[in-house]
Image (cartoon, rainbow, N blue to C red):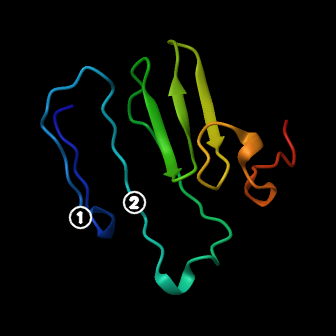
């Protein structure tokens, strides 16, 4: 990567590291919710349009404290849409220890 240009309110508080790494670097954009809207947001919409798609790239359309959604490039012809959501609460290992109201529930698939 030679450049990443970001503009607008989403870059407030942006930071980066020049430390060399061996794993895949990532970019995370945040979209703060105003205090008066917290707990009231029912949905949101976003689009990601990759300009290139190098092998083994993952384009995260959105991520939050309990999940993520994006596109993964697995081969010259294979692309996968990935979505993951985790249980609420503070139990990182056993779902049996998560309170019923904090469990993720599958409503439909297809």
| Contact, mark 2 vs mark 1 (Cβ under 8 Å) | yes
Which residue was labeled with disc 2?
A: 30
Residue that appears at 46% across and 36% down: 59
The answer to whether residue 82 is above or below residue 49 is: above
Under circle 2, the secondary element is loop
Left or right, residue 107 beside residue 22: right
The answer to whether residue 104 is above or below residue 11 is: above
Of residues 66 and 83, which is closer to you in this image?
66
Rendering quarter of residue 32: bottom left
Q: CA distance from mark 2 to mark 1?
A: 10 Å
Left or right, residue 98 beside residue 51: right
Residue that appears at 62% across and 76% down: 39
**Where residue 20 appears, x then y in whole percent?**
15, 27
Which residue is outermost to the front? 97
Residue that appears at 38% across and 29% down: 52
Determine which of the numbered discs, if any, sits on residue 13 in the image: 1
**Where residue 47 appears, x then y in whole percent?**
53, 51
Question: The C terminus appears in which quarter of the rendering?
Answer: top right
Disc 1 crowd, CA 10 A, few/some/many (<14, 14-19, 20+): few
Left or right, residue 74 beside residue 110: left
**Where residue 18 appears, x then y in whole percent?**
12, 37
């Amino acid at each position: 990567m030679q450049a990443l240009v970001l503009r607008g309110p989403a870059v407030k508080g942006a930071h980066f590291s020049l430390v060399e790494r061996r794993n895949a670097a990532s970019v995370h954009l945040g979209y703060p919710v105003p205090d008066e809207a917290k707990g009231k947001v029912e949905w949101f919409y976003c689009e990601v349009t990759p300009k290139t798609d190098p092998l083994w790239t993952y384009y995260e359309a959105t991520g939050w404290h309990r999940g993520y959604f994006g596109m993964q490039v697995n081969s010259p012809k294979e692309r996968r849409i990935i979505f993951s959501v985790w249980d609420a609460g503070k139990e990182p290992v056993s779902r049996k220890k998560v309170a019923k109201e904090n469990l993720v529930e599958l409503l439909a698939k297809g």
